Image (cartoon, helix red, strand yellow):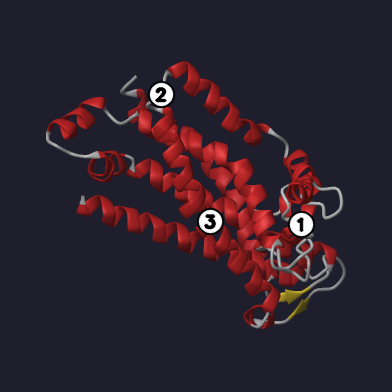
Amino acid sequence: MKSLFNDRKVIAALVLPGLLVMLFAIAIPLFISVGLSFVKWAGFGRMRFVGIDNYARLAVDAVFWRSLLNVLLLIVVTVFAQNVFAFVVASVLTKIPEGTSRVLRTVYFIPATLSLVVVTKLWVNIFHPTYGALNKALGLVGLDGLSRAWLGDPKTAVWAVIWIMIWQGFGWALLFFYGGLMTVPKELEEAAIVDGANKRQLYSHVVLPYMMPVLQSIIIIDVVSSLKQMEMIYLSTEGGPGNSTQFIALYLYQRAFKYAEYGYGNAISVLFVVIAVAITVAIQRMFRKSVEQI
């Protein structure tokens, strides 16, 4: 078996399928997208070369920058709110009896198993200004003044959409953190306690450093997921009202296919990839420095 994997032909045969998939599914479409970003084209008919005009237009496109701001807002909420709460809940679940923990893990994960369409429709109905459960609940407790069109008010729409995403994604974050916490050797925790470490020191000096690879993976997944968000926004607000809930992926789709601005849509997609790669590399470097300091 050892000599088999030292054979270059065998290695090439094993590696080649993956390289071909990457070439035809990622590299070639990316190069085509870069080329199309320099033209004005409706997706059919004649192309017209416009140079960097599409990128110059992006630089002054207020809707694009609003969509990027919303993505960054979602990343911040996901990383610093959803993940922190998921970590706390996961920590509690590792300390309680296994039977109770299993039941609670199942309950928390149920939203993640539901279809995006079902989840979005559920919350659109809850947020409905007339018959929505949220406004009716506020009315029952005498808070009628807080009732509003949650998805129709520019001040609350983006937060309502982010809440829907967080509600469905919480189960995944909890699952990752729970799995990571269960891999921390009990001997390390017991040794730290014997040495006099309190709860805060135990987590800051033992648990979190041990879970650095898990944290890195979770944050990268959160960033990529935030950049890719489209379906929920499309099904709930379509980017409205007044583009207040516009996200990059949805804006790309609308410019390319709804408004037949294929070249401009490809320019957005190229910048989309650059932003995703840049943030991912920055996160990896940040965690690498953190590990070296530990």
Q: In this figure, which residue is indicated by the disc labeled 3?
A: 77
Q: Which mark is residue 264?
A: none
Q: Is the residue marked by circle 2 packed among few (<14), some (14-19), or many (20+) residues within 10 Å?
A: few
SS for callout 1: helix
Whether residue 262 can be seen here = yes
Identified at 87% across, 69% down, the residue is: 45
Q: In this figure, which residue is indicated by the disc labeled 1?
A: 144
Whether residue 27 can be seen here = no
Q: Residue furthest front?
A: 142
- The N terminus - image quarter: top left
SS for callout 2: loop
Q: Position of residue 273 (x, y in %)?
A: 57, 61
Mark 2–mark 3 distance (CA, rounded to whole Å): 28 Å
Q: Is residue 13 above or below residue 74?
A: above
Apparent side of residue 132 relative to residue 99 in the rendered image (left or right): right
The amino acid type of the residue labelled 1 equals Asp
The amino acid type of the residue labelled 2 equals Ile
Discs 2, 1 touching: Cβ within 8 Å? no
Q: Position of residue 191 (x, y in %)?
A: 16, 30
Mark 2–mark 1 distance (CA, rounded to whole Å): 40 Å
Question: Which mark lies nearer to you, 2 or 1?
Answer: 1
SS for callout 3: helix
Q: In this figure, which residue is indicated by the disc labeled 2?
A: 96
Q: Position of residue 264 (x, y in %)?
A: 72, 72
Identified at 82% across, 65% down, the residue is: 43
Tell me the quarter of the picture where residue 92 sits: top left
Q: Is residue 60 above or below residue 153?
A: below
Q: Is the residue marked by circle 3 packed among few (<14), some (14-19), or many (20+) residues within 10 Å?
A: some
